[in-house]
């Protein structure tokens, strides 16, 4: 059985049209449609009439709770099917795609995502300011969350999956983008994206608000904190910043108070900062059981960091001396490249036991 979960909030004008389109698309399939409704208008009465006419359609009305994410989770819990789909009620998600999504699931996909950002598709259903908000939100999530980067439309509210993808998820929902939480916490190996045209809204106005945008940022933060593979990068950067402070303090002491030459003060302060960074990484960035001796990990870390310094200087030289880029900008790019080298190499060599591979 296929269970389709549709959160609704004041969508009475859309329900009859959506019902007939779903019935036309899934004729002959074993399916159920669960509306999880938070409406304050006449939508519950419309849903009740649909349920009386078509037994495969049912609704759950909530009086004291709001939020799309919690509505979807309640729908998951009430669903009978082993294949679950989620879509909006405003007709921006075309029900006609359900059969194509189901075909991919039947061919072995764990998760199928219609995407507005593949070739031949688009988001013309959004106004220009909503497009800017959506693009910014997508960029934030893809920068912050590793597993989210591997799909082109992580902000979608339209997807289909096998029930086992959700097994054991510790839900911490907030706001309206439940798909991000599934991508970060779900159990899947095969994701298929298909192009689709995001349709214009039919009936009521958008539910988007500044509050929902703030909730989205809170949701991203929560997902980063709860995901070791995403939290690790931010800890790595924070430790790196602490190393800069340690370097400056030690240099000032050695040069201004202890009387070291600038060269020796610079060398010693860099070594102390590198050692401080290693200890913090070994304790916080890559916690847990360690393989091998700490001294061996330290030597690996120093070697990688030394090569990173070389990469920084080489990038600075090439961009500034050969291509005429502003030296500050060239150095900033060099630092970014070296940071990527340091994080990647330490992940796969110094603390390789902490890696967790996810294939999508």
Image (cartoon, rainbow, N blue to C red):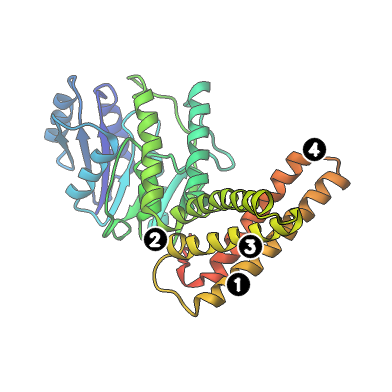
Is the C-beta separation of discs 3 and 4 under 8 Å?
A: no
Residue drawn at the location 81% of the way across and 46% of the way down: 319
What residue sits right under mark 1 in the picture? 300
Mark nearer the N terminus (3 vs 1): 3
What residue sits right under mark 2 in the picture? 188
Residue drawn at the location 46% of the way across and 60% of the way down: 285
Q: Please, what secondary structure does the residue beneath circle 1 have?
A: helix
Q: Quadrant of residue 69 in the image?
A: top left
- Give the alpha-carbon distance from disc 1 to disc 4, as whole Å: 33 Å
Residue neighbourhood size for the residue with mark 1, other residues' Cα within 10 Å, grouped as few (<14), some (14–19), many (≥20): some
Residue neighbourhood size for the residue with mark 3, other residues' Cα within 10 Å, grouped as few (<14), some (14–19), many (≥20): some
On screen, residue 296 versus residue 63, left or right, reads right
Can residue 159 be seen in this snapshot? no
- Give the alpha-carbon distance from disc 3 to disc 4, as whole Å: 29 Å
What residue sits right under mark 3 in the picture? 271
* Location of residue 286 in the rendering, given as x and y in whole percent from the top left corner: 46, 64
Vertical position of residue 63 compared to residue 25: above or below: above
Q: Nearer the viewer, residue 108 or 302?
A: 302
* Location of residue 298 in the rendering, given as x and y in whole percent from the top left corner: 56, 71
Mark nearer the N terminus (2 vs 4): 2
Q: Quadrant of residue 311 in the image?
A: bottom right
Disc nearest the viewer among 3 and 4: 3
What residue sits right under mark 4 in the picture? 326
Q: Quadrant of residue 103 in the image?
A: bottom left
């Amino acid at each position: 059985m296929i269970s389709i979960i549709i959160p609704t909030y004041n969508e009475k004008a859309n329900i009859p049209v959506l019902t007939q389109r779903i019935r036309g698309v899934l004729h002959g399939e074993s399916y159920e449609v669960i509306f999880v409704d938070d409406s304050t208008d006449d939508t519950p009465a419309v849903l009740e009439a649909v349920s009386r006419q078509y037994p495969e359609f049912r609704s759950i009305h909530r009086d004291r709770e709001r939020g799309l994410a919690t509505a979807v989770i309640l729908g998951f819990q009430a669903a009978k099917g082993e294949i679950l789909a989620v879509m909006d009620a405003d007709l921006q998600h075309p029900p006609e795609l359900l059969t194509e999504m189901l075909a991919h699931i039947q061919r072995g996909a764990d998760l199928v995502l219609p995407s507005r950002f593949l070739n031949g598709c688009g988001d013309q259903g959004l106004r220009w300011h909503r497009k800017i908000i959506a693009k910014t939100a997508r960029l934030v999530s893809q920068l912050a969350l590793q597993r989210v980067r591997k799909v082109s439309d992580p902000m979608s509210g339209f997807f289909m999956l096998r029930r086992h993808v959700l097994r054991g998820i510790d839900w911490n929902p907030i706001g309206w983008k439940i798909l991000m939480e599934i991508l970060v916490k779900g159990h899947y190996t095969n994701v298929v994206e298909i192009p689709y045209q995001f349709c214009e809204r039919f009936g009521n106005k958008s539910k988007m608000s500044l509050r929902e945008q703030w909730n989205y940022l809170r949701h991203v933060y929560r997902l980063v904190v709860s995901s070791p593979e995403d939290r690790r990068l931010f800890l790595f950067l924070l430790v790196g910043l602490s190393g800069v402070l340690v370097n400056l303090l030690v240099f000032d002491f050695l040069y201004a108070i202890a009387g070291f030459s600038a060269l020796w003060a610079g060398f010693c302060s860099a070594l102390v900062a590198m050692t401080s960074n290693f200890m913090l990484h070994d304790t916080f960035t890559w916690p847990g059981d360690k393989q091998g001796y700490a001294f061996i990990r330290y030597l690996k870390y120093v070697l990688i960091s030394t090569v990173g310094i070389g990469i920084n200087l080489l990038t600075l030289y090439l961009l500034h001396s050969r291509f005429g880029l502003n030296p500050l900008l060239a150095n900033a790019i060099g630092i970014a490249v070296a940071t990527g080298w340091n994080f990647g190499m330490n992940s796969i060599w110094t603390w390789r036991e902490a890696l967790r591979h996810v294939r999508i």
